[in-house]
Amino acid sequence: MSDLALTHRLVVLIGDARSRTLLQFLRFGVVGTIGFVVDTAVLYAGLAAGFGLYGGRAVSYLAAATTTWALNRAWTFRGLGEGAALRQWGVFVLVNLVGFAFNYGTYAALVAGVSSVAQHPVIGVAAGALAGMSGNFLLSRRFVFGAVKRAPDP
């Protein structure tokens, strides 16, 4: 089914504004999946390079955040947001620290508390990604890409 046909069906079912938000969220999820692959690959490369479970994860998070920002800018929120790309990337990383706290906190708790996760950290990366996704979507949509219009000041 094409994007246009899917969009039309969603508009009929749930309305225009909700369908746009749902499609953005679905795209955000696809981008997040790509970010997960980048995150995992860089983590394992960091582990092989001797960065350890925590240092490797910090590096892998930055690589994944940069990848997801670029893809969200180009696809999920195409044409939205203002300012220079470097500034927007900085705001993206800053507001997504909330999601990172859930993401990294979940990962760290599982690595520290579940021996099978410490042996297979991809499980912790996946759990962390899920924990941070919704918050990251809402914050990115509002503060980075400006997809939610603010009410005018009185």
Image (cartoon, rainbow, N blue to C red):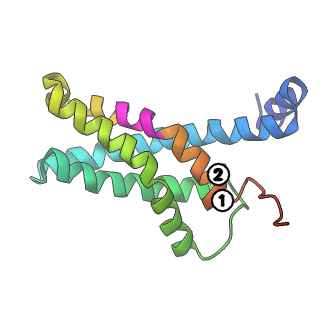
Instruction: Choose between 12 and 18: the one closer to the eye.
Output: 18
Amino acid at dot 1:
Phe
Q: Kindly check if marks 2 and 1 are in contact, taking CB atoms under 8 A apart as contact.
A: yes
Compared across the picture, whether 6 is left or right of 82 comes to: right
Q: Nearer the viewer, residue 153 or 84?
A: 153
| 43 over 154 or under it: above or below | above
> Circle 2 is placed at which residue position?
141
Q: Measuring 44% from the left and 59% from the top, which residue is drawn there?
A: 66
Q: Residue at x 77, y 33 (%)?
A: 2
Distance from the alpha carbon under mark 2 to that under mark 1: 5 Å
Residue extent of the magenta highlight: 126-132
The kind of secondary structure element at disc 2 is: helix
Counting from the top left corner in percent of width and height, residue 81 is at 68, 64
Left or right of 61? Residue 29 is right
- Amino acid type at circle 2 is Arg
Q: Quadrant of residue 26?
A: top right
Give how far across and how far down residue 20 sits, in percent.
78, 41
Task: Choose between 30 and 138: the one closer to the eye.
Answer: 138
Label 2 environment density (alpha carbons within 10 Å; few <14, some 14–19, many ≥20): many
